[in-house]
Amino acid sequence: MLKEQYPKIFLYRRLVQAKLFIDANYAAHIKLNDIAGEAYSSKFHFIRQFKEAYRKTPHQYLTWVRLGKARQLLKEGKSVADVCYAVGFESLGSFTSLFKKTFSVTPSQYYKQQLLLKAQMKTSPLSFIPACFAQNMHLR
């Protein structure tokens, strides 16, 4: 029984190592061979294993990480162009179209929404507290 499980555990550790490599290096120009190397695997075999484990290809996961970090930086008030290059995209146009495809708004629209949200939170902070919590705490 242990003999059968060991290869799966070993494989999982290698996949986690590759995932952590993506998480740590998302802003760099990393290649599939670099990521597969972290898992000590050929790139074609690695793609299949990674997708089976994480339900995304390594490229899809890298893009997902980059877009998530981009949203975070836009919330912090960074400019769209700065965010684009800071998270590893090489083209503002491709970043904008991918962001819109993923989140249904352009990065500029998202940035403006976040500014508006911050302004609203400053003027009426109680409106952002869930009603059930506010009632229990006698805030409303």
Image: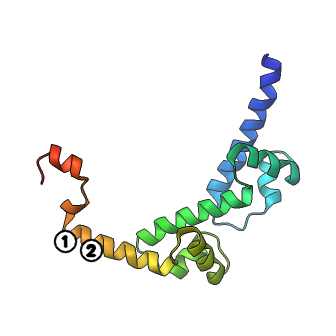
Circle 1 residue: 123
Q: Could you tell me residue 22's position as x and y percent?
A: 67, 55
Indicate the quadrant containing the N terminus: top left, top right, bottom left or bottom right. top right
Seen at 79% across and 57% down, the residue is 34
Is label 1 in a helix, a strand or a loop?
A: helix
**Label 1 close to label 2 by CB (< 8 Å):** yes
**Alpha-carbon span between mark 1 and mark 2:** 6 Å
Seen at 65% across and 64% down, the residue is 63
78 relative to 15, above or below = below
Q: Which disc is residue 119 wearing?
A: 2
The crowding category of the residue bearing disc 1, from other C-alpha atoms within 10 Å (few below 14, some 14 to 19, many at least 20), is few
Q: Could you tell me residue 26's position as x and y percent?
A: 64, 62
Give the amino acid at mark 2: Ala
Give the amino acid at mark 1: Thr
31 relative to 136, above or below = below
The image quarter containing residue 111 is bottom left
Seen at 65% across and 74% down, the residue is 89
